[in-house]
Image (tube, rainbow, N blue to C red):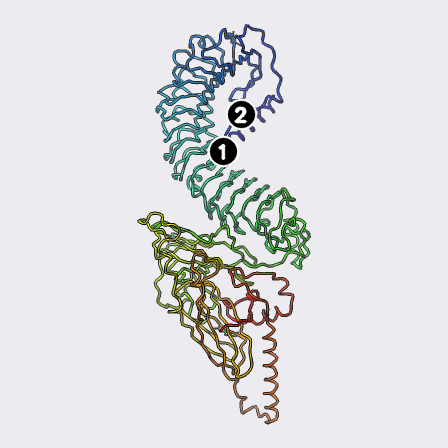
C-alpha cells in the first residue's frame, strides 16, 4: 500500500501545480464491491476504494446519486454511508435531519447544484467524520462567520466556481484540520489575511481566478504549513516585496496568467524553499540579470506563453543548484538568450526552448550546463551558421582540441523532435534538419543579425509615457550595440578611434547618458573618460541598458523620429531602424503618426562635409548632420584630366560622422561626396526625405611623396628608375583597386552575406587588406564597395 500512497501524493502535488487536483487513481485499484443495503431509487450503492485528503485508504460504502435532477435528498440513505455523491442535481437545500444521522459520512459531494447559502448545508447538523466537502459550481455569494464550524474533521473544502464576493474574516473558524482550500474562480477582489488565521494546517490553497489586483503584504503569514499556492488568472500586476512572507514551507507557486511585467524577484526571495515556480502567461518583457538567483531548492521553472518576452539577459538564472527542468516556450517575440544567461545550473537536465523566435542557442549555453540531457529547439527560426556550430553533424572544423571535445559534449545532448528542428538561415540550408547539416556547411564565424521580432519598424508611444526599444544581436565574435537617436546622437560604447584625436561622432554619449544607470559596463565607462569635452547637451532621460535596450521616460513629441540600432562586430554590422511616433494626449486618435513626424529632417542644410586631414594614402573626412541618417553613403573618385576612373561607394554606419578614407594614391586629386539618407526600412518617412537629391562634395589632393633625402646619394639614373618603379607600383595598385569588387550592394540595413565565399575569393582578400588598416568605422569586407555612377 505504501508505494501507491507515495505515488498518489506526488501525482497530486504535480496536478496541484498545474491548477487542478483530480485524483484519478481508479485504474490501478480494486474495483467496486457490491454493497447489499436498501439503496435510494435510481442511486447506486457500492463499496468503493477511497483516499482521504491525507492519503489514508478506505473501503468506503458509497451512495452515488449523480445526475438525477434531484430537488431534495433521496431516501433512504443507509446509515453507514461514507461517501454520498449528489453531483449535478437541482438541490438548493438539504434536510439536515437526514444528514445528521450519517455519523460515518466522510465525503459529501454537492457540486453543480443550486445552493446559494452555505448555512442550509452546515447549520444545526454536525458531521463529525466529514473529511471532504464539495460545493463547487453552486451559487454561493457570501460566507458568513464560522460557516463550517459544524465540520470539525474537514480536511478538504471545495468552493471554486461560485459567486463568492465576500468572505467574513472568521468564515473558516473551526477548520483546524483543513489541508486544502479551493476558493478559486470566484469574485473576490481582495485577500483578507484574517481568513487564514483559522487554518494552521492548510497545505494547498487555490486562490486563482479571482479578480484580485494586488496581494496584501504578509497576507499569508498564518499559513505556516502551506506547500502549494496557486494564484493563476488573478490580474496581478506586481507583487509587494513581503507578499509571500511567512510561507516557509512553500514548495509550489503558480502565477499563471497574470499581468506581471517583471519577475517578482524580491517577493520570491521570501520563499526560499520553493521547488516549482510557474510564471507562464504573464507580461514579462525581460528576464533580467539576477531575476532568479540563489533559489537553492528550485527544481522546475516555467516561463512559457509570454507574448511580450523579448530577451533573457546575462546571468538571468544564476546559482540554482537543484534546477532540473527549465521551460521557456511559446514566446513569440523571444529572440535572444544571452550566451551567459544561465550560470551555475549544475543539475539542469531538460531545457525546453521550442516555439520561440530564437535564431540560435549559443554554444556557451550548452557548455555552461554540464548535466544537460535534452533540449528542444524546434519551431524557431534557427540560423545554421557559426552560432549553431556545436549542433552540426561532425565537428571537423579546425578548432582547438578543447573546443572540439566541447562541441562533442554539446552534441551528446538529445534534441527533442529533431525532425522538426530545421534551419531557416542561411538560404542555402533552409529547411534542412539542423542535426543533419555538417559542420563544413556551417560557417565558423558570423555577422551580427538583429532579429525583427525584437524591434518592429514602428513603435507608437503616448506623450508622457515610457518608450522602451529592445535591440539584440547575436553573433560570433560577440557584437557591440549602440543606438542613434533622431538627432544623430550616438548612445552606447564609444568608437575605438575616439582616443586617436579624431572628432568623436557623438561626443557626449556615455557618462552623461548613463547617469543613474548602474548597469553600464566598466569598459564603456572607461571609454567615456577618454572622451574630449566637446560641448553637448544630451537628454538625460535616455537610459541604455547593457544588453541593448533603450529607455526614455516621459516621452515628449520632440523625441519622435527615427532611431537606429547598430550591432557591430569585427566582421561587419547589422542595423535596424525604428520610427517612433509620439501620440499627443489632446488630439484623440489621429490615425497613424500625428504631427510629430511631419518634419523629417531637412538635413542638407546643416551637414557640411569637411576634409580634416590628408596624408599620402588617406584622408579623414568629417561632417555634422544633427540627424539620424542611417543610409548615409560616401563615394569617392580619383580625378584625372582625361581618364575615366571608377567611383567607389561605401555605406556609413548610423551615428558615424567621420571617416578615414584609406588606400588612396599619393599626389592625386580626389572628389568625395556624402549622400545622406534615411534608410529604406524607415517606412514612415516620406519618399523624398529618404535621400537628399544632391550630395555634399569636397575635393582634395593627397600629399606628395617626400623627395629622397640628399644624403642618400643616388645617381640621377637610379632616382629616375626608382620613380619609374614607384609609378609602376601605383599603376598596379590602381589596377588592383579597380578590381576590388564589382558586386552591387543592397544598400539596406543588412550588410552580411555569404561570408565564407567572399573570404575564399582572392578579391575579397584584397578588400580585407584594404580595410584592415583603416579606422574601425570603415566598412568591413562584407560592406561592399561598388562602382557608382553619380557624384
Ligand atoms: C460507523 O462506523 C463504525 C466503525 O466502522 C461502526 O461501528 C458504526 O456502526 C458505524 N455507524 C453507523 C451509523 O453505521
Ligand atoms: C549603484 O549600485 C551601488 C551598489 O550596488 C549603489 O551603492 C549605488 O548607489 C548605485 N548607484 C546608482 C546611481 O544607482
Ligand atoms: C587613417 O588611416 C591611415 C592608413 O591606414 C592611418 O595611417 C591613419 O593613422 C588613420 N588615421 C586615423 C586618425 O585613424
Element on which disc 2 rests: loop
| Residue position marked by numbered label 2 in the rendering | 22
Image coords of residue 633 (percent x, y): 48, 68
Q: Is residue 141 above or below residue 426?
A: above
Front-most of residues 571 and 356: 356
527 horizontally vs 761: left or right = left
Element on which disc 1 rests: strand
| Residue position marked by numbered label 1 in the rendering | 252
Q: Residue furthest bottom?
A: 716
Give the crowd class for mark 1: few <14, some 14-19, many >=20 residues within 10 Å.
Answer: many
Front-most of residues 705 and 690: 690
226 horizontally vs 476: left or right = left
Q: Quadrant of the N terminus?
A: top right
Give the crowd class for mark 2: few <14, some 14-19, many >=20 residues within 10 Å.
Answer: few
Who comes first in sequence, dot 2 or dot 1?
Answer: 2
Q: Which mark is residue 359?
A: none
Does the residue tagged 1 have its C-beta within 8 Å of any atom of ligand 2?
no
Q: Is residue 738 visible?
A: yes
Q: Find residue 208 and report its image quarter.
A: top left
Could you tell me how far apart the alpha carbons at marks 2 and 1 are, in whole angstroms? 17 Å
Front-most of residues 601 and 119: 601
Q: What residue appears at the point 64 percent right and 53 percent down from the top-left corner?
A: 429
Image coords of residue 531 (percent x, y): 41, 66
Does the residue tagged 2 have its C-beta within 8 Å of any atom of ligand 1?
no
Image coords of residue 18 (percent x, y): 51, 32
Q: What residue appears at the point 53 percent right and 12 percent down from the top-left corner?
A: 63
Q: How many marks?
A: 2
Q: Is residue 764 above or below residue 343?
A: below
Image coords of residue 329 (percent x, y): 54, 42
Amino acid at each position: 500500500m505504501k508505494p501507491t500512497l507515495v505515488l498518489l501524493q506526488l501525482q497530486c502535488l504535480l496536478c496541484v501545480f498545474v491548477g487542478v487536483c483530480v485524483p484519478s487513481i481508479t485504474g490501478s485499484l480494486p474495483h467496486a464491491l457490491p454493497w447489499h443495503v436498501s439503496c435510494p431509487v435510481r442511486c447506486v450503492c457500492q463499496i468503493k476504494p477511497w483516499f482521504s485528503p491525507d492519503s489514508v485508504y478506505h473501503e468506503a460504502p458509497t451512495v452515488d446519486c449523480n445526475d438525477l435532477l434531484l430537488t431534495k435528498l433521496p431516501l433512504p440513505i443507509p446509515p453507514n454511508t461514507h461517501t454520498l455523491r449528489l453531483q449535478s442535481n437541482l438541490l438548493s437545500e438539504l434536510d439536515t435531519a437526514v444528514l445528521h444521522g450519517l455519523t460515518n459520512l466522510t465525503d459529501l459531494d454537492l457540486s453543480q447544484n443550486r445552493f446559494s447559502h452555505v448555512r442550509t448545508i452546515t447549520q444545526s447538523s454536525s458531521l463529525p467524520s466529514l473529511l471532504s466537502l464539495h460545493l463547487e459550481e453552486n451559487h454561493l455569494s457570501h460566507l458568513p462567520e464560522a460557516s463550517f464550524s459544524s465540520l470539525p474533521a474537514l480536511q478538504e473544502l471545495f468552493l471554486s466556481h461560485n459567486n463568492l464576493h465576500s468572505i467574513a474574516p472568521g468564515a473558516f473558524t473551526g477548520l483546524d484540520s483543513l489541508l486544502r482550500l479551493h476558493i478559486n474562480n470566484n469574485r473576490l477582489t481582495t485577500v483578507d489575511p484574517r481568513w487564514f488565521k483559522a487554518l494552521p494546517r492548510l497545505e494547498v490553497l487555490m486562490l486563482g481566478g479571482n479578480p484580485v489586483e494586488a496581494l496584501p503584504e504578509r497576507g499569508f503569514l498564518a499559513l505556516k504549513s502551506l506547500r502549494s499556492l496557486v494564484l493563476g488568472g488573478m490580474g496581478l500586476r506586481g507583487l509587494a516585496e513581503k507578499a509571500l512572507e511567512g510561507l516557509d514551507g512553500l514548495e509550489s507557486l503558480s502565477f499563471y496568467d497574470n499581468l506581471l511585467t517583471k519577475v517578482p524577484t524580491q517577493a520570491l526571495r521570501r520563499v526560499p524553499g520553493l521547488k516549482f515556480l510557474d510564471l507562464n502567461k504573464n507580461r514579462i518583457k525581460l528576464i533580467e540579470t539576477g531575476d532568479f538567483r540563489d533559489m537553492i531548492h528550485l527544481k522546475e521553472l516555467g516561463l512559457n506563453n509570454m507574448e511580450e518576452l523579448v530577451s533573457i539577459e546575462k546571468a538571468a538564472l544564476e546559482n540554482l543548484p537543484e534546477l532540473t527542468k527549465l521551460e521557456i516556450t511559446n514566446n513569440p517575440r523571444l529572440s535572444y538568450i544571452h550566451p551567459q544567461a544561465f550560470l551555475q545550473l549544475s543539475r539542469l537536465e531538460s531545457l525546453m526552448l521550442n516555439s520561440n523566435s530564437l535564431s540560435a542557442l549559443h554554444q556557451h549555453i550548452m557548455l555552461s550546463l554540464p548535466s544537460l540531457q535534452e533540449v528542444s529547439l524546434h519551431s524557431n527560426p534557427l540560423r545554421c551558421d557559426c552560432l549553431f556550430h556545436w549542433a552540426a553533424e561532425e565537428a571537423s572544423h579546425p578548432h582547438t582540441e578543447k573546443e572540439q571535445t566541447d562541441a562533442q559534449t554539446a552534441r551528446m545532448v538529445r534534441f527533442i523532435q529533431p525532425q522538426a528542428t530545421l534551419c531557416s538561415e542561411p538560404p542555402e540550408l533552409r529547411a534542412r534538419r539542423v542535426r543533419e547539416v555538417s559542420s563544413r556547411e556551417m560557417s565558423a564565424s558570423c555577422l551580427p543579425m538583429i532579429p525583427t521580432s525584437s524591434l518592429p519598424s514602428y513603435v507608437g508611444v503616448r506623450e508622457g509615457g515610457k518608450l522602451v526599444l529592445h535591440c539584440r544581436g547575436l553573433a560570433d565574435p560577440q557584437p557591440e550595440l549602440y543606438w542613434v537617436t533622431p538627432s544623430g546622437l550616438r548612445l552606447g560604447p564609444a568608437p575605438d578611434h575616439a582616443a586617436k584625436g579624431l572628432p568623436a561622432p557623438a561626443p557626449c554619449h556615455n557618462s552623461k547618458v548613463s547617469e543613474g544607470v548602474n548597469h553600464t559596463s566598466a569598459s564603456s565607462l572607461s571609454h567615456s573618460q577618454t572622451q574630449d569635452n566637446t560641448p553637448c547637451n544630451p537628454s538625460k532621460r535616455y537610459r541604455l541598458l547593457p544588453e541593448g535596450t533603450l529607455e526614455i521616460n516621459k516621452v515628449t513629441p520632440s523625441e519622435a523620429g527615427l532611431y537606429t540600432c547598430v550591432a557591430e562586430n569585427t566582421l561587419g554590422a547589422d542595423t535596424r531602424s525604428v520610427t517612433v511616433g509620439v501620440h499627443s494626449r489632446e488630439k484623440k486618435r489621429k490615425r497613424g503618426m500625428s504631427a510629430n513626424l511631419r518634419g523629417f529632417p531637412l538635413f542638407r542644410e546643416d551637414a557640411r562635409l569637411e576634409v580634416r586631414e590628408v596624408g599620402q594614402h588617406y584622408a579623414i573626412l568629417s561632417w555634422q548632420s544633427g540627424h539620424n541618417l542611417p543610409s548615409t553613403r560616401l563615394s569617392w573618385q580619383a580625378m584625372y584630366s582625361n581618364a575615366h576612373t571608377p567611383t567607389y561607394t561605401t555605406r556609413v554606419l548610423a551615428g558615424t560622422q567621420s571617416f578615414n578614407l584609406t588606400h588612396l594614391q599619393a599626389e592625386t586629386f580626389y572628389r568625395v561626396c556624402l549622400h545622406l539618407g534615411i534608410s529604406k526600412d524607415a517606412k514612415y518617412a516620406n519618399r523624398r526625405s529618404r535621400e537628399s537629391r544632391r550630395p555634399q562634395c569636397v575635393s582634395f589632393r593627397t600629399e606628395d611623396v617626400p623627395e629622397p633625402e640628399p644624403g642618400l646619394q643616388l645617381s640621377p639614373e637610379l632616382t629616375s628608375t626608382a620613380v619609374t618603379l614607384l609609378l609602376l607600383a601605383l599603376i598596379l595598385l590602381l589596377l588592383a583597386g579597380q578590381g576590388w569588387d564589382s558586386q552591387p550592394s543592397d544598400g539596406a540595413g543588412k550588410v552580411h552575406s555569404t561570408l565564407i565565399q567572399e573570404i575564399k575569393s582572392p578579391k575579397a582578400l584584397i578588400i580585407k587588406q584594404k580595410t584592415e588598416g583603416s579606422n574601425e568605422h570603415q566598412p568591413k569586407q562584407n560592406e561592399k564597395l561598388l562602382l557608382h555612377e553619380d557624384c
